[in-house]
Image (tube, rainbow, N blue to C red):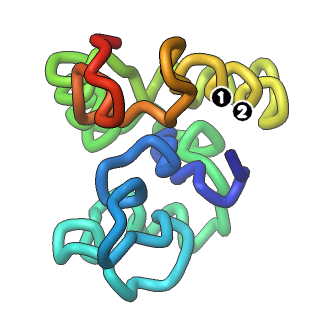
């Protein structure tokens, strides 16, 4: 897992369905917009004027963190996918990128087949084991 795949909002693009797919693979939030869905290209968090104006790497660097947009996304991801973007951001801030990525590698690797798990699925796409 690469640091460039950590979005400003705390999403780990390396475990996103769009990044993991074989065809028209999304390059991740921080890369150019080729192969990205319209919703990703127009993401209000990625395109936040405060992030751009202040050249912030992560939303936790913002004085309004967590803003309403981050709280809304976090609630949606906790409810649907059992993952918290706010928790991710707090872990990055407290422990650093290297430590966070080591934990993510463990968290999102299937214990049965070793494939990368997708945050958007409740099972391993390769062997079917529930996560």
Other-residue count near label 2 (Cα within 10 Å), few / some / many at <14 / 14–19 / ≥20? some
Residue 111: horizontal and vertical position, in percent? Answer: 53, 13
The disc placed on residue 97 is none
Residue placed most toward the observer, 93 or 7: 7
In the drawing, what numbered circle is on residue 101?
2
- Image quadrant containing the C terminus: top left
| Residue depicted at 53% across the width and 62% down the height | 51
Q: Quadrant of residue 118?
A: top left
Q: Position of residue 4 (x, y in %)?
A: 67, 60
In the rendered structure, the answer to whether residue 29 lies left or right of residue 107 reads left
What secondary structure is marked by label 1? Answer: helix
Q: Is residue 95 left or right of residue 87?
A: right
**Residue 127 sits in quarter:** top left
Which residue is depicted at the point 61% across and 22% down?
A: 90
> Does 21 appear above or below 100?
below
Q: Is disc 2 in contact with disc 1, using a CB cutoff of under 8 Å?
A: yes
Residue 53 locus on image (x, y percent): 57, 73
Q: Describe the element under mark 2 as helix, strand or loop.
A: helix
Q: Residue at 25% of width from left, 35% of height from top? A: 120
Where is residue 50 drawn, in percent x and y? 49, 63
Q: Nearer the viewer, residue 104 or 88?
A: 104
In the rendered image, the vertical position of residue 23 relative to residue 128, given as above or below: below
In the image, what residue occupies the spot 30% across and 28% down? 74
Left or right position of 123 against 55? left
How far, Cα to Cα, is label 2 from label 1? 6 Å
88 versus 14 height, above or below: above
The circle drawn on residue 105 is 1
- Between 108 and 86, the residue placed more toward the observer is 108
- Vertical placement of 110 versus 25: above or below? above
Judged left or right of residue 28, residue 104 is right
Q: Residues within 10 Å of mark 1 (few under 14, many from 20)?
A: some
């Amino acid at each position: 897992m690469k640091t460039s795949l950590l979005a400003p909002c705390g999403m780990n693009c390396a475990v996103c369905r769009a990044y993991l797919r074989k065809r028209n693979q999304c390059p991740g939030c921080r890369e150019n917009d080729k192969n990205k869905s319209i919703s990703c290209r127009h993401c209000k968090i990625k395109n936040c004027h405060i992030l751009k104006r202040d050249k912030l790497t992560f939303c936790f660097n913002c004085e309004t963190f967590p803003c309403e947009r981050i709280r809304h996304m976090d609630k949606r991801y906790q409810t649907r996918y059992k993952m918290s973007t706010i928790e991710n951001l707090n872990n990055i801030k407290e422990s650093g990128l290297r430590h966070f990525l080591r934990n993510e590698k463990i968290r999102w690797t299937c214990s049965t087949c070793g494939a990368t798990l997708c945050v958007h699925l409740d099972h391993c796409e390769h062997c079917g084991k529930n996560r």
